[in-house]
Amino acid sequence: DLALDMGFDAIGKPNASACSDELIRLLCERRPDLTVFMGENDTPDASGKVAGIDGPMKQCERARNAGLRAVFVLPPRGKDLREWKNVHGATRDMLERIVRNAT
């Protein structure tokens, strides 16, 4: 996972709704200082929903409702973290700045 390569503890999921209950349970057991849910700038589906935004936002809300400190962020450029880093040159410091601004 790219976030791991950037020096973060990370969990990559194949889609936003996969293993949702297990993820919240794991986070509640681990109690991290802050959990960051990174969305993706996906194209809306026919109903206007954006899976890469709606799913992680729901997970973030569930984490907050479970008493965890959590934020949702999007890469400012590119579709996802990978594109932001590989095409637009994102660094760990840039991602940390976005997270700080979201808290």
Image: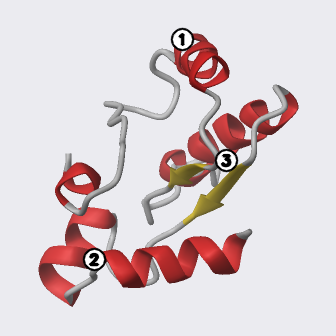
Which badge, 1 or 2, is on the more N-terminal residue? Answer: 1
**What numbered label is drawn on residue 57?**
3
**Callout 2 secondary element:** helix
Picture residue at 21% right of the left edge, 76% below the top:
85
**What numbered label is drawn on residue 22?**
1
Which badge, 1 or 3, is on the more N-terminal residue? Answer: 1
Picture residue at 81% right of the left edge, 38% below the top:
64
Task: Describe residue 89's horizontal placement relative to residue 24 as left or right.
Answer: left
Kindly identify which residue carries mark 2: 84
User: In the picture, residue 21 is in which quadrant?
Assistant: top right
Q: For label 1, count other residues whose C-alpha is less than 10 Å away and answer few (under 14), some (14-19) or many (20+).
A: few
**Callout 1 secondary element:** helix
User: In the picture, residue 66 is in which quadrant?
Assistant: top right
Pick whichever, 16 or 37, lies toward us. 37
**Which quarter of the rendering shows the C terminus?**
bottom right
Task: Describe residue 1's horizontal placement relative to residue 29 as left or right.
Answer: left
Task: Describe residue 40's horizontal placement relative to residue 54 as left or right.
Answer: left
Q: Position of residue 82 (x, y in %)?
A: 22, 64
Pick whichever, 91 or 76, lies toward us. 91
Q: Position of residue 84 (x, y in %)?
A: 27, 77
User: Is 73 located above or below residue 13 in the figure?
Assistant: below
Pick whichever, 89 or 18, lies toward us. 89
Three-letter amino acid code at disc 3? Met
